[in-house]
Amino acid sequence: MQEYEQILEKIEEIRKTKGRCIVSIDGRCTSGKSTLGTYLKEKTGGELIRMDDFFLRQEQRTPQRYNTPGENVDHERFTEEVLLPLAGNEAFVYYPFDHSVMGVGSRGVQVQPSDVVIIEGSYSQRPDLKPYYDLNIFLTVGPEEQMRRIEKRNPDKVEMFRTKWIPLEEAYFSAFHPEASADLVIHTDSLTNQQGSSVK
């Protein structure tokens, strides 16, 4: 996609100016965040960190938390383990979420200082996290295509997405408007991106 090449150009421009570039990729589920994150990692040789490694621990999954927009991620641990060391350009270790224990896993992932770091996943552009990034990308997809992709990818979890995960995401988008403040917005309804993109 032409937009992917444009992202690479922006990353290189920022890297040359600042010495490195920290990229965030937020957006609606099934919009292609993981695919773009993998692509950028392969093309830049940078580090890729996924927000899915920071699911809420079992004890954090309270009605109060779910009812607060943007709280469906362990942003506290993400800030401490990832963003603060990144801000200091330090090596660090973070501990991905382990579904078998519904909590933090015991195997750490080591990350060395890198010219390019890609943060990929929903809620990555919360207002408290956004200041750490140099380039914010938002991917979006229409509701009909989104449900088609969910039915194809997770046929056994369609209702969970429809009634829980999508409403939680949309509450976050409505509260904080990451799409409106992103540096680059890409619509991914079709492979040829016929809906186009908007760049700021």
Image (cartoon, rainbow, N blue to C red):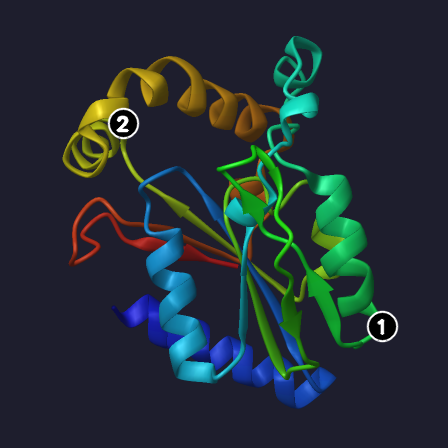
Query: Can you say which quadrant of the picture contains the N terminus?
Result: bottom left
Can residue 128 be seen?
Answer: no
Q: Which residue is mark 1?
A: 88
Q: 153 and 122: which one is in front?
A: 153
Quadrant of the image occupied by residue 54 = top right
User: Percent position (x, y) of residue 169?
Assistant: 49, 28
Please give left or right for residue 157 compared with residue 76 in the image: left
SS of the residue at dot 2?
A: helix
Mark 1 or 2: the one toward you: 1
User: Percent position (x, y) of residue 71?
Assistant: 66, 28
Please give left or right for residue 16 compared with residue 120 in the image: right
Q: Is residue 97 above or below residue 49?
A: above
Please give left or right for residue 93 compared with residue 36 in the image: right
Inter-mark Cα distance, 1 to 2: 40 Å
| Three-letter residue code for mark 2 | Pro
Q: Which mark is residue 18?
A: none
Q: 40 and 196: which one is in front?
A: 40
Residue at horizontal 54 percent and vertical 21 percent from the top: 171
Residue projecting furthest to the top: 63
Can residue 158 be seen?
Answer: yes
Give whichever of discs 1 and 2 has the lower sequence position: 1
| Three-letter residue code for mark 1 | Gly
Q: 189 and 75: which one is in front?
A: 75
Residue at horizontal 57 percent and vertical 41 percent from the top: 178
Quadrant of the image occupied by residue 189 = top left
Q: Which residue is mark 2?
A: 143
Residue at horizontal 65 percent and vertical 52 percent from the top: 106
